[in-house]
Image (cartoon, grey):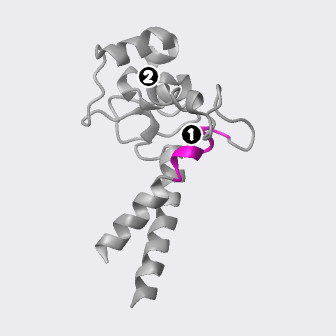
Amino acid sequence: MQVIIRQVRSEDASHLKPVIGQYAAPEPEVKGLEPPIFADNQKSRTKMGINHPQLAAMLCPVKHLGEYLDDPKGTRQKLENGDIKMRAQVWPAMVYSGKIPGKDFNPKQVQNGLLKGYLIERVSFFNTLIDLRAFMMCTSIR
């Protein structure tokens, strides 16, 4: 059963990548990412991660977000060359709440807004659908 669940998650998670531009936009029904990311365009997809200005802000360690908002190009350069470390122990801005995730981060109250980022909520819903689909496939096999 675990093998089937992993296969379904892997298969379905691969479907998330082409639409991440819609999930990552603060208000996708109003405006998408700028510049847009198109699933069928290899050149567009190379602008993902820290190569994309909005995605870089979301991936930036939350304690450096203020610096990023003041100087996006300079801070992106620091992220790229490793002057700002992106380690697992440091929360990225995207896990915090806000239209600009992490903008209201308070280092004295790190728990405020933690895991309330809109991208986390949207992807969690997506993963719940994947889990439901895996469960349905497993129960229909028996």
In the image, residue 24 sits, relative to residue 6, either above or below, namely above
> Which amino acid does the dot numbered 1 rest on?
Ala
- The front one of 20 and 141 is 141
Which quadrant of the view contains residue 6?
Answer: bottom left
Residues rendered magenta in the picture: 15-27
Q: The residue tagged with tag 2: helix, strand or loop?
A: helix
Q: In this view, does 69 lie above or below 9?
A: above
Residue lying farthest bottom? 142
x and y, in percent, of residue 42 in the image: 56, 32
In the image, what residue occupies the spot 52% across and 58% down? 126
Disc 1 and disc 2 in contact, CB within 8 angstroms: no
Q: What is the x, y in percent for residue 113? A: 44, 42
Q: What label does residue 24 carry, if any?
A: 1
Q: Does residue 103 appear anywhere in the picture?
A: no
Which is more N-terminal, label 2 or label 1?
1
The residue sitting at 72% across, 35% down in the picture is 31
Task: Give coordinates of residue 114: x percent, y percent.
Answer: 40, 43
Q: Which of 97/54 is in front? A: 54
Q: Is mark 1 on a helix, strand or loop?
A: helix
Residue 78 lies in the magenta stretch: no
Other residues around mark 2 within 10 Å, as few (<14) / some (14–19) / many (≥20): many
Mark 1 burial class by Cα count in 10 Å: few <14, some 14-19, many 20+: many
Left or right, 127 with respect to 36, comes to: left
Which residue shows up at 50% across the image and 40% down it? 97
- Residue type at the position of mark 2: Leu
Of badges 1 and 2, the one in the foreground is 1
How far from the left and from the top, in percent, is residue 54?
A: 55, 27
Whether residue 9 is visible, yes or no, is yes
Residue named by callout 2: 65
